[in-house]
């Protein structure tokens, strides 16, 4: 995802540089038209057969996405492909036609949990209630790194969290591990909330600092480098867990695979 985001609206010179440094691959997984013939009303099974005929014998950088009707093979892919940076597998009914803007597939993703430090929060757009909790993990050097957020709370719970976390507020945030978050240079050697990017624009990235003393368990599906790829899901508080014990070592590390090897 990070490499893909670099390619959105870059300068022409950067396009050439990225094409050489991290060349893109084209992975085909469906066929909606062939010549002048539309295949939208054709069942997926037949579209897949047509796609395999069209791409027979192709070579890099063109690839045909693997597909199978064997549940056991799909289960092996589910475990192996994560090491190549994939979230999981997708299941689709073979007898259904393609329907634009209609979700007909099932995403099967990995589900894991981790104990993380709650080191701050952002306000919700609706008012002075918690919008998201800022989560951290300690690295091998003992530095607290920002790894993501959890944000799916009911309106009542958002208000309760304001009161619940009030004793931990640090205002000003002097001494907080992420106190220098507003300084662009501070992001060079650490993961802090509010990292500057071309996506943030004028968005308010401010947050409320908390003493990093509370631990919660969250659910997540995949890591993107040293952070959660998607928003984590709050599970429960962990009063029995010391914040300093919440490090990267608890995270599962899938066996690494090269994506091109999987697609071959």
Image (tube, rainbow, N blue to C red):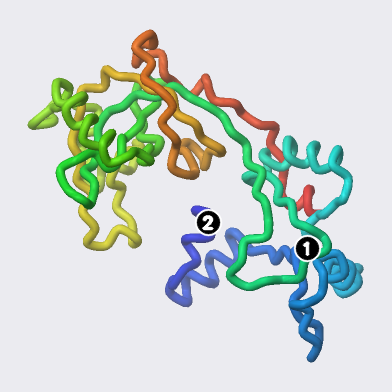
Q: Please report whichever mark, 2 or 1, sits nearer to the chain's N-terminal start.
A: 2
Q: Secondary structure at mark 2?
A: helix
Q: Nearer the viewer, residue 101 or 145?
A: 101
Q: Residue at x 24, y 38 (%)?
A: 130
**Mark 2 and mark 1: Cα distance apart in space:** 19 Å
In the picture provided, is 111 more to the left or to the right than 44? left
Q: Position of residue 178 (x, y in %)?
A: 24, 33
Q: Position of residue 115 (x, y in %)?
A: 44, 21
Q: Nearer the viewer, residue 99 or 117?
A: 99
- Locate the C terminus and report the quarter of the image it occupies: bottom right
The residue tagged 1 is 63
Q: Is residue 207 above or below residue 15?
A: above
Q: Secondary structure at mark 1?
A: strand
In the picture provided, is 31 more to the left or to the right than 208? right
Whether residue 79 is visible here, answered yes or no, is yes
In the picture provided, is 37 more to the left or to the right than 17? right
């Amino acid at each position: 995802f990070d490499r893909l985001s670099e390619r959105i609206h870059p300068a022409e010179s950067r396009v050439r540089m990225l094409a050489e440094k991290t060349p893109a691959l084209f992975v085909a997984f469906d066929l909606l038209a062939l010549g002048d013939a539309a295949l939208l009303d054709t069942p997926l099974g037949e579209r897949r057969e047509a796609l395999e005929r069209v791409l027979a014998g192709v070579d890099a950088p063109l690839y045909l996405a693997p597909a199978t009707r064997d549940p056991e093979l799909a289960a092996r892919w589910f475990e192996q492909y994560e090491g190549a940076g994939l979230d999981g597998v997708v299941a689709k009914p073979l007898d259904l036609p393609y329907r634009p803007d209609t979700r007909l597939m099932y995403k099967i993703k990995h589900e894991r949990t981790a104990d993380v430090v709650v080191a701050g929060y952002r306000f919700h757009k609706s008012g002075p209630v918690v919008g998201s909790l800022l989560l951290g993990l300690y690295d091998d050097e003992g530095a607290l790194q920002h790894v993501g957020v959890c944000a799916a709370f009911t309106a009542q719970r958002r208000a309760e969290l304001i009161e619940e976390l009030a004793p931990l507020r640090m205002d000003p945030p002097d001494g907080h591990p992420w106190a220098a978050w507003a300084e662009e240079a501070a992001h060079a050697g650490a993961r802090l909330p509010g990292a500057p990017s071309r996506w943030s624009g004028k968005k308010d990235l401010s947050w409320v600092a908390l003493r990093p003393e509370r631990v919660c368990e969250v659910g997540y599906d995949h890591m993107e480098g040293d952070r959660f790829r998607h928003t984590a899901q709050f599970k429960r508080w962990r009063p029995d867990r010391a914040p300093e014990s919440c490090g990267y070592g608890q995270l599962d590390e899938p066996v690494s695979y090269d994506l091109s090897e999987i697609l071959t």
